[in-house]
Amino acid sequence: MSDALTQLEADVSLIPAAIQARTLGSILGRVSEKTQDANRQAQRCVALVEMANSLDGLSTATVERAVSHAIKQTLEVGEMLANAQGADDLEAIYEDYGEIIVALRDLDQQVRFVWSLKAKSDYASLIPVGHLLMRIAGAEALGRKLVDIGTKAEALAARAQPAETLAPEITSLKADRQQALADMAKFTESPEVDGFLDAVTKGAATLETVTPKVTAWLKAHDALGAFKVTG
């Protein structure tokens, strides 16, 4: 997969020159009109693959197939554009170019669906955890960071924008999330505390989740009073 991406990015730089070099009459006009955005489509393919990778979408069979198909179609037409020699070659490009659009549309839908799920499960879910940590002494800044990450993800998921601008934002947000979770693990220093906080945010905490270690941690952070028992 990485070799294909390297070749794809190399071919992207060849496409504009190939388009400008065509001088073959009416077929040239038709091909040029249809493929004038070939460079943008290639960049879109690169961005969608980046998004899929950032979202761990390549572990999903349907996304992996869509990625492989989109790369294959983009590479094939890119090579045809770069190596076109005559009217027959251009006619073939004209006929095949629509396959890139279809392949990228399918990949775009698959990747954005994964992103919509991840935005809720991996990012928006940080918001209640953040609000909870903001009530605990020493965790206020971390709590605000979690809320900020979750809020940004919600806004990003609700905003329609091209893959080329969405991909780097998702990559950046993923890095922020990983760092925040690492900071939270350092702060809690206990999987039991992490489990308790997660259960509280889901309204699923029970007395069984309030283990001696959790109680000691809450007491150490003057947070016992931040919770109450309901039944």
Image: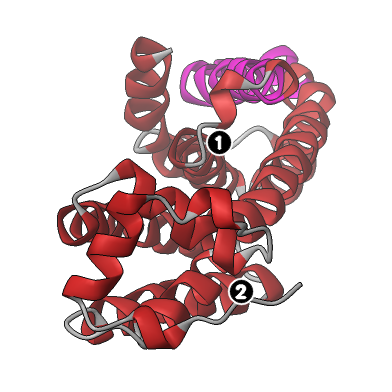
Residue 87 drawn in magenta: yes
Q: Position of residue 19 (x, y in %)?
A: 52, 40
Residue 48 drawn in magenta: no
> Which is closer to the viewer, label 2 or label 1?
2
**Label 2: few (<14), some or many (≥20) within 10 Å?**
some
Quadrant housing residue 142:
bottom left
Residue 163 in sight here:
no
The residue at the point 33 percent across, 62 percent down is 215
Residue identifier under label 1 = 22
Picture layout, residue 10 above or below residue 148: above
Secondary element at image label 1: loop
Query: In the depicted view, which residue is nearer to us: 211 or 107?
Result: 211
The residue at the point 55 percent across, 47 percent down is 44
Quadrant housing residue 17:
top left
Residue identifier under label 2 = 154
Quadrant housing residue 61:
top right
Which numbered disc, 2 or 1, marks the residue that appears first in the sequence? 1
Q: Give the number of the disc on residue 186.
A: none
Query: In the depicted view, which residue is nearer to us: 175 or 64?
Result: 175
**Label 1: few (<14), some or many (≥20) within 10 Å?**
some
